Amino acid sequence: MKIGIVGCTGRMGRMLVQAVVNTEGAELAGGTERENSPFIGQDPAVVAGEVPSGAVITANADELFAKADAVIDFTAPTATIEHAKLAAKHGTGLVIGTTGLSADDQAIIAEAAKSTTIIQAPNMSLGVNLAFAITEKVASMLSDDWDIEIVEMHHKHKVDAPSGTALGLGRAAAKGRGVDLDTVADKVRDGFTGERKKGDIGFATLRGGDVVGDHTVMFAIEGERFEITHKASSRVIFARGAVTGALWTQSAEAGLYDMQDVLGLKD
Ligand SMILES: NC(=O)C1=CN([C@@H]2O[C@H](COP(=O)(O)OP(=O)(O)OC[C@H]3O[C@@H](n4cnc5c(N)ncnc54)[C@H](OP(=O)(O)O)[C@@H]3O)[C@@H](O)[C@H]2O)C=CC1
Ligand SMILES: O=C(O)C1=N[C@H](C(=O)O)C[C@H](O)C1
């Protein structure tokens, strides 16, 4: 299966290239970067520290979507929505790992998924997808006397907050509780905030150093606290998950899926 990587020289892009060239049944179709990138014309595998693959980095995403069976996108929201349109145009499978997308961006992705298979997940790791399922279950078993708080920490280069995974954990908790996250989310606290509102789902964001990604969901009540924690120590878990997703697109109907679909974690 021919897999393309857009944004192939980024932190995740390089890990994705490594994962593709080391996965049986996967072949690197090529990679993209912006027009002014110093990597244009180079082999993405060599940039990622692998042996030459014969593939080339270009700024022509249209060409990559035309020749690939699936493309993996860990870039930025403005790029991702254009990639979703190209996936629909060419009927190419698409795996989206990019976070920080707006509601309007989501609508464009949902429209594209009418014509092709798209897998979108804020976290491609098995551990976090288990945490999504467990969080929903625990939230469904506890009353809203239990306060739910989500804490995340990432490296200093991360540009969106709260992380896509933290928001995913919030959505899972809200779903378990039978409420809409948008109406109960408390994402920023500063100054004289007053007491915590019963039923809110709070978020706290930490940034620093080279932390790959830590997430904790806390269920707190007077006298005790129950926590679900995931810590990523290598980006390889996201890259492997994304390549598994890309291979999975080949056998799925057009539609919008997540990693819980791919990993068979749904009831
Ligand atoms: N779902 C998951 O499991 C995970 C998701 N992520 C998400 O993935 C995204 C990327 O993260 P990360 O790799 O750390 O970020 P980086 O900034 O390191 O990588 C992004 C890459 O995409 C490139 N890019 C941006 N726009 C375009 C474009 N129009 N065409 C081609 N390339 C483009 C960037 O180039 P330039 O530098 O020139 O802008 C850069 O090389 C983030 O949203 C992050 O949250 C990260 C890890 C796991
Ligand atoms: O930007 C990152 O690095 C990560 N982003 C994802 C997110 O926003 O949840 C996933 C992972 O935690 C790393």
Image (cartoon, rainbow, N blue to C red):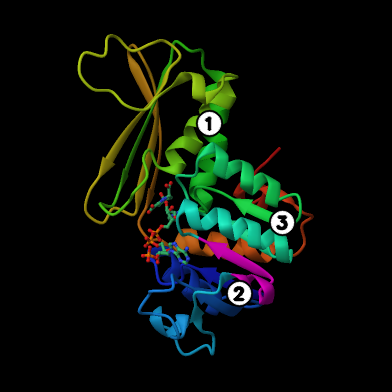
- Residue 128 lies, with reference to residue 150, above or below; the image says below
Whether residue 49 is visible, yes or no, is no
**Image position of 147 with respect to 50: above or below:** above
Q: CA distance from mark 1 to mark 3?
A: 23 Å
The spot of residue 193 in percent (x, y) is 26, 14
Q: Which residue is mark 2?
A: 64
Of the numbered discs 2 and 1, the one sitting upstream in the chain is 2
Q: Earlier in the sequence, mark 1 or mark 3?
A: 3
Where does label 3 land, which residue? 117
Q: Which residues are magenta?
A: 62-73
Q: Nearer the viewer, mark 2 or mark 1?
A: 2
The residue located at (64%, 70%) in the rendering is: 65
Measure the C-alpha gap from mark 2 to mark 1: 34 Å
The amino acid type found where label 3 is placed reads Thr
Towards the viewer: 241 or 110: 110
In the image, is the residue at mark 1 within 8 Å of ligand 2 by its beta carbon? no
Residue 64 located within the stretch drawn in magenta: yes
Residue 75 visible? The answer is yes
- Discs 1/3, front: 3
Q: Nearer the viewer, residue 244 or 33?
A: 33
